[in-house]
Amino acid sequence: MNSQRGEILAPEQLAIFEEVDEAIVRLEVVKALIEYRALKVQIENMQERMAAGAINLYPSVRKVSPLNEMKVRQMDRALKYSLNDDERLIIEKKYLSGVKVKDIEVYMEIGLAKDRYYEIKRSAISLIATALGII
């Protein structure tokens, strides 16, 4: 359905969208979310060291990418503006808490039916992938 005009799209209209492997998209988004947690801490630590004048507090064995800050800003934006409250809550509890949790723990804790939980989670991952340009 075309949400702007309420029209139902014909199969030939849907064919303009390239098929994507949902498992690959999910894997890439999950990797980006896990990396995001570490990069966010890295940037905050770097800012703290710079403010204290202790830039070389720890030895660096690889060069820090200048793109890391952009990755964090873009993920922050994706999480804040592309997800609704339920989608954001699921992503935060499942991937951003720093604690490995099973899906059943998340949907039981927030009081969602299993099918509804997976529907919302799938939508959230798709929206993040779209916002980041993964799809």
Image: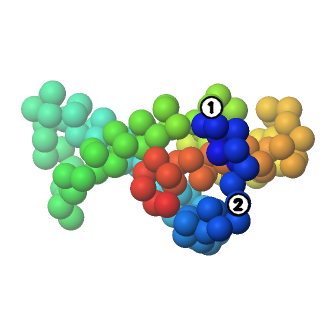
Q: Residue at x 10, y 32 (%)?
A: 53
Q: Which residue is mark 1?
A: 84
Question: Which residue is at 56% across, 57% downward?
Answer: 30
3 horizontally vs 105: left or right: left
Q: Is residue 95 visible?
A: no
Q: Nearer the viewer, residue 116 or 62?
A: 116
Give the residue type at disc 1.
Asn
Tell me the crowding category of disc 2: few under 14, some 14 to 19, or many 20 or more residues within 10 angstroms, Cα based. few
Residue at x 89% of width, y 41% of height: 113
Q: Kindly identify which residue carries mark 2.
A: 10
Which secondary structure lies at badge 1? Answer: loop
The count of marks equals: 2
Quarter-wise, where is residue 93 in the image?
A: top right
How does the figure colour the protein chain or chains? Answer: rainbow
Rendered location of residue 47, percent (x, y): 22, 34
Residue at the limit of the structure toward the left, as seen here: 53
Q: Is residue 64 left or right of residue 24?
A: left
Vertical order, 92 against 102 (above or below): above
Structural distance between the alpha carbons of marks 2 and 1: 28 Å
Q: Earlier in the sequence, mark 2 or mark 1?
A: 2
Relative to 49, say whether 134 is above or below.
below
Q: Position of residue 88 (x, y in %)?
A: 61, 35
